[in-house]
Image (cartoon, rainbow, N blue to C red):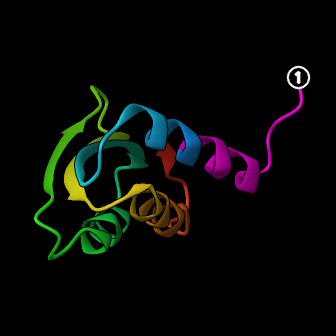
Amino acid sequence: MKKDSPDEFYKRLKEELLRTSSWPSDYLYKFIVPTDPEKIKAIQLIFDNTGAVIESRQSSKGKYTSLSVTVNLKDPDAVISNYKEVAKVEGVISL
């Protein structure tokens, strides 16, 4: 199966968000991060001063940390902008 390019993925995501939500709206991000304080801090800084609520939970062996970030955003472009910033943090999986 052919994997979409990031641009195609973000285009589809924007269309879906416009169709299914009214904006501004709360959006829930879910990320899996290697348990590394620097990587976790980098993600937290992306959402700093946004009013985001960030919950974290380590995996049973402590190798990974899941981050759930709920934040009120003005439009789908803001959602996508945050995904692009988080993608710069090495080893992060966006769910």
Q: Quadrant of residue 90?
A: bottom right
Above or below for 49 versus 17: below
At x 54% / y 48%, what residue is drawn? 14
Say whether residue 12 is magenta: yes
User: x, y (%) of residue 40?
Assistant: 30, 61
For the stretch drawn in magenta, the main secondary structure is helix
Comparing 28 with 75, the one in front is: 75
Say whether residue 79 is magenta: no
At x 43% / y 55%, what residue is drawn? 76
Quadrant into which the N terminus falls: top right
Q: Which residue is mark 1?
A: 1
> Is disc 1 placed on a helix, strand or loop?
loop
Above or below for 44 versus 56: below
User: x, y (%) of residue 36?
Assistant: 35, 59
Q: Could one spot residue 95 in this view of the protein?
A: no
User: x, y (%) of residue 30?
Assistant: 35, 40
Q: Which region is colored magenta?
A: 1-13
Q: Quadrant of residue 66?
A: top left
User: x, y (%) of residue 13?
Assistant: 56, 42
Q: Quadrant of residue 38?
A: bottom left
